[in-house]
Image: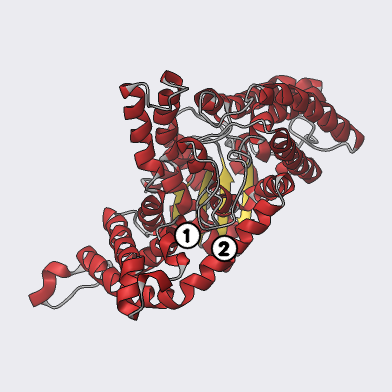
């Protein structure tokens, strides 16, 4: 597997722990609605809900270790997740300040501050990756009959615990340097203030085509470089991290996405519909309406973005720039809101009573302005450059007329056929909106047939990796594809 393909695999695995955040957002959001002033101090029910949500937020590092180990394992087995947990406990115990002081024979006061921050998502991700690789290597090993009970999957946690002792001693030497580098990166970005937030949003959008935005998000949204924007917002933290110089406005790496996802992208969808040829408007309307509603209510934007990402790359660059401008502007105006899943209406409502939500309603006003900006900009560029957005394509007499179906099982079978058959598929996986595949021979995949089945985009990575963007039903289709004989 090439480096890009491997990072793709890591990015996909990161979505496993991130997927639990909506639970925390809902619990804490309802708690803040019940008691917006006391933050749970004036209502036992509110306190119960807020604390329940905090149980997820406060343990994100463990969730990353477990989730990444599970997500990167070859067969998604629970033994991989258990191995990730074992590995994380070994590393964080051996590298706790007290343990470091005892092992190195130095006073506790001389232990580098970095070891006070060993329980973080970066270490969780690192442990998860190593645990998954060890699981993939040793889960099929058969021991001598006398030790047969410990063969296979039971062997992996034992191997992981031993390997993590070695990893801990390596980290004992290099962790202060790694932590210092991450801290410096976080300080540099946070030092740029609103400009840094805008730059992050710009690159966040640019990385979506290759699926690496999840890795970038972990730096700004979680405690990898000391920024930790989502957990800080949900738990009402100010964003000042004691012992570091990371100081920022909590929510500044989230708020500006609401105007884009709730209003800007629907404006782009309306422009694409307006620019479509008259004979194609009805078909384009159904596609754009579904994608725009998904973006508005849930913040799931990929179905809409992939509709023009490859057909009109210039529009996607404009979209990335406008996303950066929106996040920069919201941060500058200190209009703050946050999310547990994505920047849609559901999360905006849930976060509106959060103690750190500041003039969140102005994000709606900003969004209305961005609807107009997206609509008129996209429409002018589409018509001015005669871009082949949905509904403006040249007619293709020989285009495949694949018969689509509402039945997920039959649709999965059709996707398998369009990808060259089940024997051509080495890895079948999915994230929120895309199939993530490794093919024996990628030339066997018929891109035209995939799009005829409803795929909104196809992304080729490395030599054999392929992503097919099909919307929120991706995981369901992937599971059914695995069952195709």
Question: Residue 93 placed where, x, y %?
Answer: 30, 65
Residue 146 visible in the picture: yes
Residue 122 tag number: 1
Residue at 70%, 31% in the rendered image:
265
Q: CA distance from mark 1 to mark 2?
A: 9 Å
Question: Residue 481 placed where, x, y %?
Answer: 42, 45
Left or right: residue 386 compared with residue 276: right
- Identify the image's colour scheme: rainbow, by chain, secondary structure or one colour: secondary structure
Towards the viewer: 176 or 394: 176
Residue 163 visible in the picture: no
Q: Which residue is mark 2?
A: 182
Circle 1 SS class: helix
The furthest residue to the bottom: 105
Asked if 366 appears above or below 158 in the picture, the reply is above
Among numbered discs 1 and 2, the one appearing first in the sequence: 1
Circle 2 SS class: helix
Question: Residue 370 placed where, x, y %?
Answer: 76, 28
Image-quadrant location for residue 153: bottom left
Asked if 414 appears above or below 89 in the picture, the reply is above
Residue at 45%, 55% in the rendered image:
121
Marks 1 and 2: CB-CB under 8 Å?
Answer: yes
Residue at 70%, 34% in the rendered image:
330
The furthest residue to the right: 384
Residue count near mark 1 (Cα–Cα under 10 Å), binned few <14, some 14–19, many ≥20: many
């Amino acid at each position: 597997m090439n480096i890009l393909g491997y990072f793709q695999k890591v990015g996909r695995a990161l979505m496993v722990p991130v997927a639990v955040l909506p639970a925390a957002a809902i619990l804490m959001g309802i708690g803040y609605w019940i008691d917006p002033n006391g933050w749970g101090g004036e209502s036992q029910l509110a306190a119960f809900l807020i604390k329940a949500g905090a149980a997820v937020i406060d343990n994100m590092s463990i969730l990353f270790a477990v989730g990444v180990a599970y997500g990167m394992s070859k067969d998604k087995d629970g033994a991989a997740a258990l191995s990730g947990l074992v590995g994380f406990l070994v590393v964080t115990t051996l590298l706790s300040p007290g343990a470091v002081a005892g092992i190195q024979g130095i006073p506790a006061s001389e232990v580098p501050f970095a070891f006070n921050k060993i329980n973080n998502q970066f270490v969780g991700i690192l442990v998860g990756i190593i645990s998954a690789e060890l699981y993939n290597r040793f889960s099929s090993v058969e021991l001598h009959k006398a030790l047969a009970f410990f063969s296979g999957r039971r062997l992996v946690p034992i191997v992981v615990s031993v390997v993590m002792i070695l990893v801990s001693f390596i980290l004992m030497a290099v962790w202060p340097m790694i932590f210092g580098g991450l801290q410096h990166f976080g300080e540099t970005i946070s030092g740029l203030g609103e400009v840094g937030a805008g730059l992050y949003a710009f690159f966040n959008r640019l990385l979506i085509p290759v699926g690496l935005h999840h890795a970038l998000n972990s730096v700004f949204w979680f405690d990898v470089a000391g920024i930790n924007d989502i957990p800080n917002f949900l738990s009402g933290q100010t964003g000042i991290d004691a012992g570091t110089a990371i100081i920022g406005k909590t929510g500044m790496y989230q708020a500006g996405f609401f105007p884009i996802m709730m209003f800007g992208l629907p404006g782009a969808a309306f422009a694409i519909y307006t620019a479509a040829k008259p004979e194609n408007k009805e078909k384009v309307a159904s596609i754009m309406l579904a994608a725009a509603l998904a973006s508005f209510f849930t913040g799931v934007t990929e179905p809409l973005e992939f509709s023009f990402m490859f057909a009109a790359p210039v529009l996607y660059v404009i979209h990335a720039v406008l996303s950066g401008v929106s996040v920069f502007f919201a941060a500058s105006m200190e209009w703050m809101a946050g999310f547990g899943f994505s920047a849609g209406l559901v999360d905006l409502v849930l976060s509106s009573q959060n103690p750190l939500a500041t003039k969140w309603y102005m994000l709606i006003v900003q969004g209305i302005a961005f609807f107009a900006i997206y609509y008129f900009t996209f429409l002018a560029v589409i018509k001015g450059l005669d871009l082949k957005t949905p509904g403006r394509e040249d007619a293709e007499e020989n285009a495949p007329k694949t018969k689509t179906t509402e039945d997920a099982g039959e649709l999965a079978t059709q996707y398998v056929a369009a990808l060259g058959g089940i024997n051509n598929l080495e890895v079948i996986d999915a994230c929120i909106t895309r199939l993530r595949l490794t093919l024996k021979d990628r030339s066997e995949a018929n891109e035209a047939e995939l799009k005829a089945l409803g795929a909104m985009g196809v992304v080729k990575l490395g030599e054999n990796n392929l992503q097919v963007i099909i919307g929120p039903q991706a995981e369901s289709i992937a599971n059914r594809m695995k069952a195709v004989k």
